[in-house]
Amino acid sequence: MKNERTIVVTGAGRGIGAATARLCAQRGDAVVVNYARDAASAEALAARLRDGGAQALALQADVSDEAQVLAMFHRIHAELPPIAGLVNNAGIVDVAARVDEMGLQRLHRMFAVNVVGSFLCAREAVKRMSTRHGGHGGAIVNLSSVAAKLGSPGLYVDYAASKGAIDTFTVGLAREVAAEGIRVNAVRPGIIDTEIHASGGHAERARELGAQQPMQRPGTADEVAQAIVWLLSDEASYTTGALLDVAGGR
């Protein structure tokens, strides 16, 4: 399969990122499977995508580290078709805590990954996709969360605040580059059954809270990926600056 465009998916080794990478590959795109630490999962996914006929490259980069982000985009430019899409999926959550229990290191890391990382990756993607810079346009999809509007009191207000920043970033960047051939949107998942809950110390959270949602179940990574890939596609050609909730009515 000859791929004519590349989609970069950060944090793609598992969960929503992996589901998005698989769906992009099925649609004929070359895919960058970015990861920060879990090389085994990312490499295994990239290998499966290549076995299916797609171009796929697993690339390590902590998105909060500018040097690593620059190195990743330079390698993409050298080895893959032109970038036409970025999915800012990489993000972290921490253990449940009140604001008056949060240390400075936790806050710095939360915003460095969830907010600064998205800015850095978007900056490099815009440099390559914008018609202002000689590109052919493209699309950016940021991963926010319904926590941005709910606040997540008693759990992780810091995470919710970082996703609120992503919402504002999405709207601002969308308007900034709309005339340069780039669309920017965000997907806000609700309770989704992925591994991220375990990293927050509550592995069963999605299943426990799923029954309390209006649809009485948690969502799946594939359901979120479908929304992301639609926003990346030409089918969403007049959609920019949108915040799309994929939250089962939450």
Image: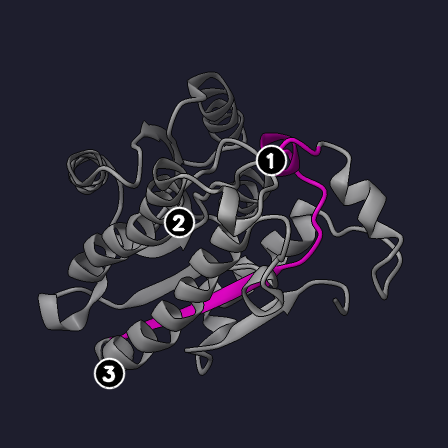
Relative to 236, say whether 133 is above or below. Answer: above
Region rendered in magenta: 181-202
Q: Judge whether 104 appears above or below 149 on screen.
A: above
Q: Residues within 10 Å of mark 3 (few under 14, many from 20)?
A: few
Is residue 189 in the magenta section?
yes
Which coloring applies here? Answer: one colour
Q: Secondary structure at mark 1?
A: loop
Rendered residue at 58%/70% (across/down): 149
| Label 1 crowd (10 A; few <14 / some 14-19 / many >=20) | some
Residue 143 appears in the picture as rendered: no
Whether residues under marks 2 and 3 lie with C-beta atoms below 8 angstroms apart, the answer is: no
Image coordinates for residue 182, horizontal then vertical, percent: 30, 71
Residue where numbered disc 3 is placed: 179
| Circle 2 crowding by C-alpha within 10 Å: few under 14, some 14–19, many from 20 | many
Task: Between residue 92 and residue 126, name the one nearer to us.
Answer: 92
* Circle 1 residue: 200
Say the numbered circle drawn on residue 107: none
From mark 2 to mark 3, how far is it between C-alphas? 26 Å
What's the amino acid at mark 3?
Ala
Q: Are marks 1 and 2 in contact (CB under 8 Å)?
A: no
Q: Earlier in the sequence, mark 3 or mark 1?
A: 3
Residue designated by label 2: 114
Residue at 66% over, 46% down: 221
Q: Amino acid at mark 1?
A: Gly
Q: Residue at x 61, y 41 (%)?
A: 96
Q: Which of the image's four quarters has the N terminus?
A: top left
Q: Kindly give the residue lying farthest to the top in the view shown.
A: 40
Q: Looking at this view, is 149 or 234 the one in front? A: 149
**Mark 2 or mark 3, whichever is nearer to me:** 2
